[in-house]
Amino acid sequence: MRIAVPIHSFEPGGVERVALNLCAAWHEDGEYVTVVLGREDGAMRQTAPALDYAFRPEPVPTAAFETLWMMWVLRGYLLRERADVLFASGNTYGIVAVAMKLLLGRRCPPIAIKLSNDLYRKDMILPYRKAYHWWLRVQGRWLDHFVGMAQPMRAEIAELMQVPDKKITIIEDPSLEEAQYADLSALPRPAAPRPPHYIAVGRLAAQKNFPLLLRAFARLDDPAARLTILGEGAERAKLERLAAELGITDRLAMPGHVADPLPWLAEASAFVLSSDYEGVPAVVIEALAAGLPLAATRCSVSMPGLLGDGAFGRMVEPGDEAGFARTMQEVLTMPFDCAAARAAAAPFRISRAAKRYLDLFAKLAASG
């Protein structure tokens, strides 16, 4: 099969990282995979797999209007080259996918989209939420197939996108490469008491609500506790100012995007996720594989299942600062089965998901 996958750039992001890993797995299986790039820049460029990348030189810097630029680049590619299926790797590519259906008509290949974020979006005020839910129904009308990343998403997709069950497939989010899972599962978990070290991973963006995390961390009674946030983004300066205001700068580390988080995960006591909304966060899967308890917000319908209904961590409602602080303390003393947590992460290995995607694509290509 000829599979086309649009990606804005090599900027760090869970959606893009998982998509590139899937493309590499399909390529190794002998499929013809082309990643259609909007831009060639980004921190993941040096570690990106060796694949066929199609791009058009930017006439001007396009980061500020990357979605429009991706529509132009992808349309041109699909007019020049044959594709049996188009894979939209996350919610952010939904508008690009619908645009291809409208612009290309019958010349557009079948499109499968992976729903990478929460669809209810209770973080939005009501008018915006209603508009967003309308947009989900538009995607349900135009796109061919919808992939949820955990079983609880099936009902969410059917309800909000108004699509029949036959157009929905659940494929566990392929967050982990085999070697990565082996390395994470082999990390020793220190048994001796030590000062708490919390770790978070994610883009420094509004969705992740790191201000909530910083304020909750500042509430902790333990002056020896430390917090590390791995990631880069537009909110760095804002977060650094807030840390200074809260007086936690000397206990906070923000080293930016790192290619290998294992050394930090090995030193951590617990993983923290403060997002307003998510789908099935890859970082949560990585934390489970590393054998870490989690303090998280109830940022998606899948989160209770990921946390083993309380066996692997605790949750609070998004935005609950005091509750998040309590939860950060509770997870350090809760009963926790490290081996069970690592086993819960095993279904999210890329080797299991890649074949299921190819089976789905073959059916779509045959029906298209």
Image (cartoon, helix red, strand yellow):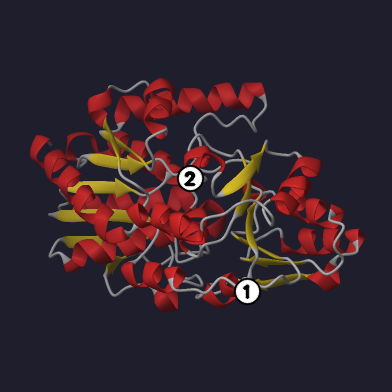
Residue 38 visible here: no
Element marked by disc 2: helix
Element marked by disc 1: helix
Mark 1: give few (<14), some (14-19) or many (20+) Cα within 10 Å: some
Q: Is residue 104 left or right of residue 328?
A: left
Image quarter in which the C terminus is found: top left
- Above-or-below relation of 128 to 270: above
- Viewer-proximal residue among 196 and 81: 196
- Above-or-below relation of 354 to 257: above
C-alpha separation, residue under disc 1 versus residue under disc 2: 22 Å
Residue 72 visible here: yes
Q: How far from the left and from the top, in percent, is residue 356?
A: 21, 48
Determine the residue positioned at 60% across, 52% down.
335
Image quarter in which the N terminus is found: bottom left
Determine the residue positioned at 52% across, 60% down.
287
Which amino acid lies under the numbered mark 2 shown in the image of this protein? Leu
Residue identified by numbered label 1:
267
Residue identified by numbered label 2:
306
Q: How far from the left and from the top, in percent, is residue 151?
A: 37, 36
- Above-or-below relation of 100 to 62: above
First in residue order: circle 1 vs circle 2: 1
Q: How far from the left and from the top, in percent, is residue 295?
A: 65, 50
Determine the residue positioned at 68% across, 36% down.
317
